[in-house]
Amino acid sequence: MNKIIIVLFLTLFGNTVLAQELEIQTFGNQNNKALIFLHGGPGYNSVPFEQVTANELANNGFFVISYDRRGEGRNENLKAEYTFTQTLEDLNKIYQKYQLKKATLVGHSFGGIIATIYADKYSDKINNLILVSTPISMQETFKNIIASSKEIYTEKDDKVNLNYISMLENMDSTSLEYATYSFMHAMSNGFYSAKNPNQKAVELYQKFKTDTLLKKYASKNEYLAPQKFWENEQYTSISIKKNLESLQNKNVSIFGLYGKEDGLYSKEQIASLEHILGNEKVKYLENCSHNVFIDRQDEFIDSVKKWTN
C-alpha cells in the first residue's frame, strides 16, 4: 500500500486518505485502470461496495476509488451544499488528487445519475460510464413501484395498504413525500432483494451486514441529504435520457447492469434503456435485484472487465 504523507487511515479494506477535505478509499495499484464508484442515495454510503467488491475489482487489475458524497456517510460532517454543482466539483478534485486524465465511472442507483451528469459535462474525462441499477427516469420508477405494490396488495386483499396507495396516487408526484412513501413501499415489499440469492450472495450479505462501519453509518443523514438535494435540485423529477443521448453523440461508451428482480424498474424501462444504448450494452440478470455487485458479483466483475478492455 502506498503511504500518503498528509493523512493515512488504515482500514480493513483499503487505504483511506483525507484529500481535498473528502475522505476517500482506494484499492489496488494506482498505475492500473482507474475506476471511480459512486454510491446510491441520497443519504447513503459506499461501505457495502467497499466491503465486498472493491478489493475483488482491484485484484482484477483496477485502481478503485470510492468515497461518500459530501454531507453523507463518512463525510457527513463536511459542510455540504447538496447540489450537483458541488458534487461534480468534488469529483473533479478526485481526478486532480490522483492525477487522472480519464477514468471509468461506475454509478450505483442515484450515483448513476450523478455519474451521467458528470460524464455529460466532462466527457473528455470518461473512459466508460457503467450504470448499475440506475433510475433513468425517477417518475417512471415511482410509477412502477406504486403499480407493482398495488398489484401485491390487491392479491393479498390488503385494504389498509391499498388505501395508502390510493392516497399516494393523489399526491404531487414530484414531492419528496411522494418519493419517500414510494421507496417505503418498495422496501416493505422486498423490491431491493433477490428472492433466491445464490450461496455466494448470501455469504456476501452476511459479511457486510455484520460490518461495524456499515452499522455506524446505516442511518446517518438519511433524511437530511434527500431533503436538501430535493430542495436544491428537485431530483425526484429527473430523467437522464437526454444526457445519455448526448453522451452517445459524443461517442462515450455507456453500459448498464440491472437485476430482473429489482422491483424499482419494469421490463419496459430496461427496454427503453436498451433502445438508447443498444441491446448488447445492457445486461439484465436473473436472480438479481438492486445490489448487482453483491447479488451477482462474478457477473458484475466480468462485465466491468469486458467493458473496460
Image (cartoon, rainbow, N blue to C red):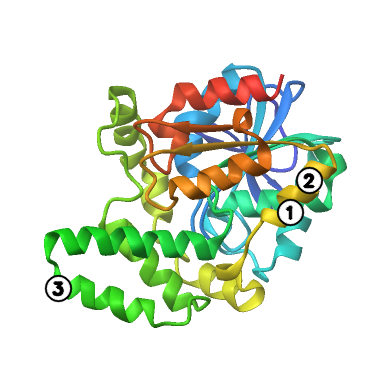
The answer to whether marks 2 and 1 mark residues whose Cβ atoms lie closer than 8 Å is yes
| Crowding near the residue tagged with mark 1, few <14, some 14–19, many ≥20 C-alpha atoms within 10 Å | some
Residue 34: x and y in percent read: 72, 30
Q: Determine which residue is flagged by label 3.
A: 159
| Crowding near the residue tagged with mark 2, few <14, some 14–19, many ≥20 C-alpha atoms within 10 Å | many
Q: Residue flagged by tag 2: what amino acid is it? A: Leu
Mark carried by residue 243: 1
Residue at 68%, 71% in the rendered image? 81
Give the CA distance from mark 1 to mark 3: 41 Å
Quarter of the image with the C terminus is: top right
Quarter of the image with the N terminus is: top right
In the rendered image, which quarter is residue 71 located in? bottom right
Please tell me whether residue 168 is drawn above or below residue 107 in the rendered image: below
Can you see residue 1? no
The answer to whether marks 1 and 3 mark residues whose Cβ atoms lie closer than 8 Å is no
Residue 160: x and y in percent read: 16, 75
Q: Residue flagged by tag 1: what amino acid is it? A: Asn
In the rendered image, which quarter is residue 7 located in? top right
Q: Determine which residue is flagged by label 2.
A: 247
Residue at 74%, 42% in the rendered image? 6
Can you see residue 212? yes
